[in-house]
Amino acid sequence: MRQTLAEKLIESHLVAGTPEKGSEIALKIDQTLTQDATGTMVYLAFEAMDRPRVQTELSISYVDHNLLQTDFKNPDDHLFLQSAARKFGVYFSRPGNGICHQVHLERFGHPGKTLLGSDSHTPTNGGLGALAIGAGGLDVAAAMAGQPFYLTYPKILGVHLAGSLPDWVSGRDIILELLRRLTVKGGLGYIVEFYGPGAASIDVPTRATVANLGAELGATTTVWPSDENTRFFLHAQGREEDYTPLSADEDAVYDQVIFLDLSTLEPMIACPSSPDNVVPVREVAGKEVAQVIIGSCANSSYRDLMMVAGAVEGKTAHENISLEINPGSRQVLENIISNSGLMKLIQAGARVQSPGCLGCIGVGQAPASGTISLRTFTRNFPGRSGTKGDQVYLCSPETAVAAALTGRITDPRDLGDYPKITLPEEFIINDKIVIPPLEDTTGTEIIRGPNIKPFPDFGELPDRFEARVILKVKDNITTDHIMPAGSEILPLRSNIPAISRFVFQALSPDFAERAEAEGTVAVVGGENYGQGSSREHAAIAPRYLGVQVKLVKSFARIHKANLINFGILPLTFINPDDYGQIAEGEIIAIEGVRERVLGGAVEIPVQIGEKKIMTSLDASERQRRILAAGGLLNMIRQEG
Ligand code: MIC
Ligand code: SF4
């Protein structure tokens, strides 16, 4: 009945709320995934919820981010995660098996199922027709405990595809074109749904690339239909029985529609330092490049690496280029080995790494100062690569390999014959690196090395508070700004007191000391505050330091949910000009706040010195109870 696919997926999982755009709904979650950098907190929270075993159809714990073992911290986390998986009935994908989203797509993704993951690129599995959503760890822990996932029913942005992709143009260019048009906040409050005759020409790995990067639009998720391409891919994965055809109704009505003729697309590139700073490759062609990396959950599939192998066959990477390959999964690696792709890459001089996130989250692979690095990664936020003042460009594997060969940014269409890849009828499959859950978990114990610190306790929301504004920031602040990652900070993810020292490190190096000296503090921000990753550490660590309120022009979806989950009041300016009324150093006072929050007040008056401004609290009745309790964990403990 004129339904989009996203609406069908939502309504088949609706357990509470009315199916109306903009209202709060609750969805049954079939599958969950975690990765190590967010996962330790998830399992600590799950443990605190006191449930013996996960209640989902399938829950899986991946280790892909913190693979570097320079001391005990990361291996402590791995051991903790493996033992927690054994205790709680969770699959465990061992370190080196690959990036969560890629492995999930290959082995577990399921058309028509809901998947909640503690990573912002969880929508990757929308490439298979799943409703796959990224969330904060506490929401994932709650889903593992059998609770539904609460969200605002998003609007649906239909992308109508016609035609087919020209040679040397790939999925990455589809989403780069959308990022160029819509920007990093264009997808806020939307699910992006692909449909139309052009969709049939797009294979599942390409769909997954597009769905993955829909996260950079700020979208709740991205969905593709489940069709013959999906059947083919699942068959090649030895699990055709998981196939179900799914699509929108012929006359489905979208809230907004974008028409895209695939045959008119050309190679695109995101310039430093935002994924939406997109131009056609030819506009920046000729710039000298020092590093090319093909990898990350966006672009490291068998298709991507075999295409690169085909392009470098018999050639050598330019002498000034470090060509680095990060396979998305062990399956990708095994299959490119068996189809001679690895040999071609190695002979071309590529440095082939073990499957994982690696340089995408600043764990190794930092570029040299003052040089250009071309990457097929997801994000090029300033400094994320580990090098100050970095110049990271994001592009397709096609554009990346062209630069690897010429030493300069090059339109890949200049390379000649396109090594078009056909997916194998059957992939080599090896599930031995994934440990299935035990039927009977009695006697299993969680192993907690010294890197695993208990979850901090937070108090309830007080009746009134005063908070000094110790930081005022501009638009599009990312969670990488709030809580940086990288090889030195990531190993502290299981230790909130230690990681909190790095909050806002680049923007305000003494933020932690100033916050602690004040006791209760506030942060003021612009539009799309907290975009990017799902890391709830960007909420927990500030809360630990005494941040009680964030007052901004608008919030990114996951960050706002995380703030509520950890008891930080997320207020927005009713009149955006009031942003100019507040200066760093001023004190914000809110009277009767607890009563207002619990009483459902949408408008919250805020006193700033002599001035009074009106702010808005856009929160459901449930979220208000969470805020009053001082966070979701407190509420679950109170309400059972
Ligand atoms: C990212 O790409 O930013 C991350 C690292 O995968 C994050 C999760 C995290 O911070 O652990 C994400 O995308 O959610
Ligand atoms: Fe890992 Fe990068 Fe993907 Fe995040 S975006 S999950 S760091 S590969």
Image (tube, rainbow, N blue to C red):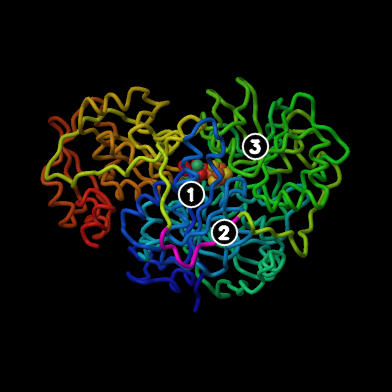
| Amino acid type of the residue tagged 3 in the rendering | Arg
Percent coordinates x, y for residue 364 in the rendering: 59, 31
Residue in front for this viewpoint, 166 or 369: 369
Q: Quick one: SS at disc 1?
A: loop
Percent coordinates x, y for residue 188 in the rendering: 44, 51
Q: Is residue 269 visible?
A: yes
Queried on whether the Cβ of the residue with tag 2 lies below 8 angstroms from ligand 2, the answer reads: no
Q: Quick one: SS at disc 2?
A: helix
Alpha carbon distance from label 3 to label 2: 22 Å
Labelled disc at residue 120: 1
Image position of 526 (left or right of 162): left
User: Which mark sits nearer the N-terminus, 3 or 2?
Assistant: 2
Queried on whether the Cβ of the residue with tag 1 lies below 8 angstroms from ligand 1, the answer reads: yes
User: Which mark sits nearer the N-terminus, 2 or 1?
Assistant: 1
Q: Which residue is mark 3?
A: 375
Image position of 480 (left or right of 512): right
Percent coordinates x, y for residue 237 in the rendering: 69, 64
x 24%, y 48%: residue: 616
Residue in front for this viewpoint, 434 or 519: 434
Point out the stretch of residues depicted in magenta: 434-443
Alpha carbon distance from label 1 to label 3: 19 Å
Task: Tell me where residue 150 sits by quadrant.
Answer: bottom left
Outermost residue on the right side: it is: 314
Q: Using a 10 Å C-alpha cutoff, classify the residue at mark 2 as few (fewer than 14 neighbours), some (14 to 19) or many (20 or more).
A: many
Up the image or down, 231 lies above or below 493; here it is below
Q: Using a 10 Å C-alpha cutoff, classify the residue at mark 3 as few (fewer than 14 neighbours), some (14 to 19) or many (20 or more).
A: many
| Amino acid type of the residue tagged 1 in the rendering | Ser
Q: Which residue is mark 2?
A: 125
x 48%, y 61%: residue: 59
